[in-house]
Amino acid sequence: MMIKNKLTDSDIESMIVKEEYKKMGEKTCVGCFTLANGFEIVTSSACVDPANFDLELGKNYCRQHAINKIWELEGYRLQQRRYEDK
């Protein structure tokens, strides 16, 4: 993917090529997100009370954590590119 001067939500979303989720213990969801370049991001979400555990909700939180991490990584990469282009 060519580095652009601006990133969009769809740019970030398109970087995820594989998602895997697993319930760990009684109240934790772990997600592994493989990016197009092969890099993997691992995230987690958990609730306090196991009776409130909802795997689909956990997946949503894990995915949002991964999206936030991709924004952080791609923001750094864009900033570095601008710095090097000076």
Image (cartoon, rainbow, N blue to C red):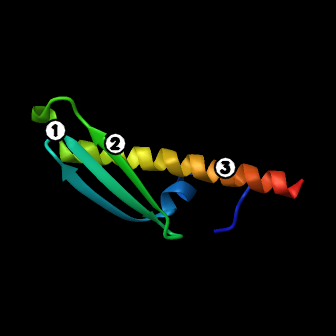
Q: Residue at x 20, y 29 (%)?
A: 48
Sequence-wise, the earlier of marks 1 and 2 is 1
Q: Which mark is residue 61?
A: 2
User: Could you tell me which secondary element the residue under label 3 belongs to?
Assistant: helix
Q: Residues within 10 Å of mark 3 (few under 14, many from 20)?
A: few
Depth check: 81 or 5 in front? Answer: 81
Q: Residue at x 25, y 47 (%)?
A: 29
User: Could you tell me which secondary element the residue under label 2 belongs to?
Assistant: helix
Mark 1 and mark 2: Cα distance apart in space: 12 Å
Residue 56 horizontal side relative to residue 35, left or right: left
What residue did someone put label 1 on? 53
Residue 85 horizontal side relative to residue 49, left or right: right
Residue 49: image location, x then y, percent: 15, 30
Mark 3 and mark 1: Cα distance apart in space: 34 Å
Residue 85 horizontal side relative to residue 33, left or right: right
Q: Residue at x 47, y 49 (%)?
A: 67
Residue 62: image location, x then y, percent: 35, 47
Of marks 3 and 2, the one in the foreground: 3
User: Could you tell me which secondary element the residue under label 1 belongs to?
Assistant: loop
- The amino acid type of the residue labelled 1 equals Phe
Q: Residue at x 16, y 46 (%)?
A: 25
Sequence-wise, the earlier of marks 3 and 2 is 2
Depth check: 4 or 68 in front? Answer: 68
Residue 9: image location, x then y, percent: 54, 50
Mark 3 and mark 2: Cα distance apart in space: 23 Å
Depth check: 20 or 1 in front? Answer: 20
- The amino acid type of the residue labelled 2 equals Tyr
What residue did someone put label 3 on? 76
Q: How many marks?
A: 3
